[in-house]
Image (tube, grey):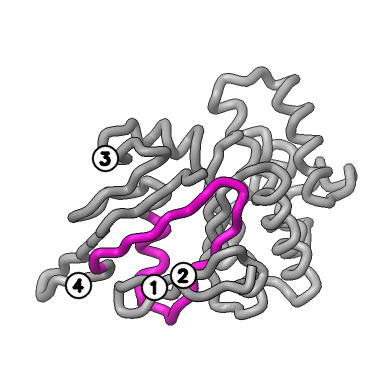
Amino acid sequence: MERLRAERVSYCYRTKYQTIEALKEVSCSFAAARMYAIVGESGSGKSTLLSLLAGLDVPAAGEILIEGENLRDMDRDRYRRDTVSVVYQAFHLFPLLTAMENVMYPMQLQGISRKEACRRAGMLIRKVGLPEKIFGQFPKMMSGGEQQRVAIARALAAGGKILLADEPTGNLDSENERHIVEILKQCAHEDGLTVIVITHNPAVAAAADGIYRMCDGRLKEEESDK
């Protein structure tokens, strides 16, 4: 089932001296229960596309459709709160909150009681393979791999259908990279999420069900053996 689609999306950055075409009539589609990789050189437009899919801005031209509904016509704040979550290379955990509190945060924004948010947060932290001793730890007390797992648990806490990840293994060693990729694949194949990963890493891209390559603001789907 198609969940997310970009139709001839273009986007420009304007500076004092020039206009930069970051995206040029990009079209792509993403289904439920599949993991996708978007690859390409730095500056090719990957992160710009991800920010538009996340609802952080709207295209200059073209449409982004979520299950057929135009994102431009939606409440984008609510879309980012309830439908889409983003995981970043730098983790972006709240430094003064424990692992448990970080994961509880998006649920409390949705009005879920503290008791229920705590119960669900514990389940999610275990789901990404972390022990209970992590619950009360602050980010600076965790390894990079542990922080990224907590970040994924927090992204899942909102209960959305779309998970976007911007270089999620970029700061990790090969063992933690493998664990994170397995968690993301599980989110897609077992939990039914649409998972879209921006990556420079060929091994991460090879794990995806579909691959798009970005070059100079244009997107092309690559052949996949899956």
Amino acid type assigned to the residue bearing label 4 in the image? Ile
User: What residue does disc 1 label?
Assistant: 220
Q: Are marks 1 and 2 in contact (CB under 8 Å)?
A: yes
Q: CA distance from mark 1 to mark 2?
A: 6 Å
**What kind of residue is marked 1?**
Lys
Viewed as shown, does residue 31 lie left or right of 123?
left
- The residues bearing labels 1 and 3 have C-alpha atoms spaced at a distance of 24 Å
Q: Contact, CB < 8 Å: mark 4 with mark 1?
A: no
Disc 4 is placed on an element classified as strand
Q: Is residue 21 above or below residue 79?
A: below
Q: Amino acid at mark 3?
A: Arg
Name the foreground residue: 85 vs 188. Answer: 188
Q: Measure how far apart labels 4 and 3 are at the Cα level.
A: 22 Å
Give the extent of the magenta segment. 24-51
Dot 3 falls on a residue whose secondary structure is helix
> Which residue is pictured at 43% across the width and 81% down the height?
41
State if disc 3 and disc 2 touch (CB < 8 Å): no
74 displayed left or right of 105: left
**Amino acid carrying mark 2 in the image:** Tyr
* Residue position for label 4: 20
